[in-house]
Image (cartoon, rainbow, N blue to C red):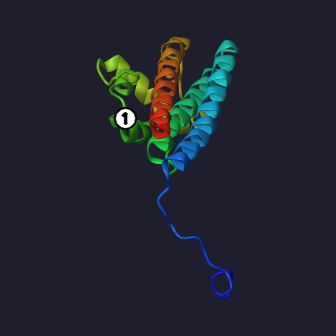
Amino acid sequence: MLYDNKKSKLARKRKLNYAEIKQQAEEYCNEKFDSANNKLKLAKYAANEELYKDTIFMLHQACENYYYAIRLVFTLKSNKQHNLSKLSSSVKSYSPELANVFPLHPAEEKRLFDLIKAAYVEARYNPKFVVTKEDIDALIPKVELLRDITKRICEGKIGEYGE
């Protein structure tokens, strides 16, 4: 209706200046990073209560939000994605450190990644989905490493925008 009334003009796409990019990147980062930290906190609570399926689902959500934070800071774009393989691939070029979070070798590392990746659906809908305390104990430090790397590289990139 606005377009057709010939009285209103719609905004045109334009390039942002670095101050605008920095502001938007900070806002995106704060939102997604805080959300991820909250999910990690909830995962730890669930782990203490021995609710391992809830724990791994929240760990998945934390990873998803850390990856979103990175992608948003570096590109200001984010399409909705829940597949951790695709999310991690979409940000791996921003820091070689990211490959250390979920290495795919040896086989146990790949199994852990496949487990957390599957949790988005399986932990909620598959009554036969099994997650052990040992799995959780191995995954929490990985998500904490992702948190630390995310914080470091996002702060670095936002700093670049300020320069």
Between 73 and 99, the one lying in front of the other is 73
Place of residue 80 in the rendered image (x, y in percent of width and height, measured from the top left):
52, 50
In this rendering, the answer to whether 25 lies above or below 116 is: below
Residue placed at 36% from the left, 29% from the top? 95
Residue 102 in view: yes
Determine the residue located farthest toward the front in the rendered image. Answer: 163
Give the crowd class for mark 1: few <14, some 14-19, many >=20 residues within 10 Å.
Answer: some
Q: Is residue 103 left or right of residue 30?
A: left
In this rendering, the answer to whether 27 lies above or below 112 is: below
Q: Quadrant of the N terminus?
A: bottom right
Residue placed at 53% from the left, 70% from the top? 12
Residue placed at 36% from the left, 34% from the top? 92
Label 1: element kind:
helix
Amino acid type of disc 1? Answer: Tyr
Q: Label 1, on which residue?
A: 94
Residue 127 in view: no
Q: How many marks?
A: 1
Q: Quadrant of residue 47?
A: top right
Between 58 and 65, the one lying in front of the other is 65
Place of residue 61 in the rendered image (x, y in percent of width and height, measured from the top left):
57, 34
Between 51 and 144, the one lying in front of the other is 144
In this rendering, the answer to whether 12 lies above or below 50 is: below
Place of residue 24 in the rendered image (x, y in percent of width and height, measured from the top left):
57, 46
Q: Is residue 122 left or right of residue 83?
A: right
